[in-house]
Image (tube, grey):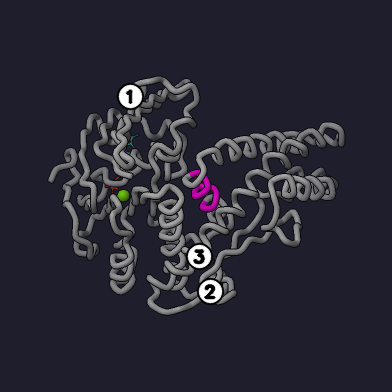
Amino acid sequence: MKVDWVSLAHFRSYQELEWQPDPGVNLLLGPNGAGKTNLLEAIAYLSSLRSFRSVPDPSLIADGEIAAVVRAGVSSGSRERLVEIELPRSGPRRTQLDKSRLRKTADLLGVLRVIAFLPDDLDLVKRGPAYRRDLLDAVAVQLWPAAHHDQGEFDRALRQRNAFLKSGGRDDMTLSVWDARLAQSGGRVMSRRARVIETLSPHLESAYGDIAGKPERASIGYIATWGARHALDGAAADFTAAILGSLERSRKVDYDRRLTSVGPHRDEPVLALDGIDTRTHGSQGEQRTMALAIKLAAHRSVAEMIDEPPVLLLDDVFSELDPQRAEALAKTLPPDTQTLISSARPEDVPVEGAVWRVGDGVRR
Ligand SMILES: Nc1ncnc2c1ncn2[C@@H]1O[C@H](COP(=O)(O)OP(=O)(O)OP(=O)(O)O)[C@@H](O)[C@H]1O
Ligand SMILES: [Mg+2]
């Protein structure tokens, strides 16, 4: 999968930009604030329909403008597609695929698949569980675009249940309506997470070995707050039943705390080396290698699923690594993959590729 060209209008620091990346490795170089991350963010947005900086859409619109537009030509095998998305400051997004208006923005998902790695991701292992849940959910969307819908439903149901609890309501009839909705969507979110873990696992082990250069068994596990003993077996309906039971059991606590204390939004994905939690026991270096390995594993998993490598974005990652690990990452970069690497310090990037200067536009 490749981005043949990208065109931006009023997107962050770009008034206008036309750029045709190489199909192979691209190095985006330029000083701090030049717009390197902004460009990668625009491309990633087409793939996940949200900013990888976890900010609301209006921040993506250039200051003083009323709408941003991102367009790209994307090729997959011999098929070329034209993707367009307009983000207005108010009102819904407008999307087009091959010049026809899409009824739902989410129909764009899957046209461009991207795995992005940001400097913050290096801390994935040591940060709170929310980051690791988000990782699983983001990989799920790249593997199965329909996951986006389930995640949206779940988030809405959770917000509504929490709003009811926060208002001080204590009414089992009303709560049971929210419980059912939360458990339904939660079951689907959970079954995707379980399949992401299953899909990632073999790739995680091999990717960790490739970067670390020594055999250690990297694995990913999952601690479910809703108490299923064999949390990762079963179909969506089994997860739904388990979550529902747990919500009912925790009602009293939830009324008192005025929030939803159990469910997929409180679970903890665990990354481990030889069975031991890397968050609590790993060295800083092991934690970072694990973070790199999980992203490479995600890339390998999606490549296997769609039978071609997704686009890989590495935003300023090399400068954050010691030379040895940077070298290891460079050697492990996936072949035949369009890779966009940004850096303010080219000497930190031990990778060959098409060199682009980012500053006033993007030029060779
Ligand atoms: N909505 C916006 N409108 C206009 N300019 C914006 C907007 N959002 C961000 N910017 C500008 O974009 C610039 C940052 O761009 P970006 O994050 O892409 O830089 P970078 O090249 O990645 O830098 P670094 O090397 O520090 O990571 C900042 O100068 C910021 O003011
Ligand atoms: Mg940047």
Considering every residue shown, the one lying at the far left of the view is 364
Q: Which residues are magenta?
A: 135-141
Can you tell which mark lies on residue 202?
3
Compare residues 298 and 179 and report the one nearer the observer: 298
Q: Is residue 21 magenta?
A: no
Q: Which residue is mark 2?
A: 273
- Asked if ligand 1 lies within 8 A of label 1, the reply is yes
Determine contact: label 2, label 3, CB under 8 Å.
Answer: no
| N-terminal label among 1 and 3 | 1
State which image quarter holds ligand 1.
top left
Q: Tag count in the figure?
A: 3
| N-terminal label among 2 and 3 | 3
Q: Residue 175: percent from the left, percent from the top? A: 81, 36
Q: Which residue is mark 1?
A: 65
Picture layout, residue 218 above or below residue 234: below
Q: CA distance from mark 1 to mark 3?
A: 46 Å
Tell me the element at label 1: loop
User: Horizontally, is 172 left or right of 16 in the view?
Assistant: right
Q: Residues within 10 Å of mark 2 (few under 14, many from 20)?
A: many
Tell me the element at label 2: strand
Q: Residues within 10 Å of mark 1 (few under 14, many from 20)?
A: some
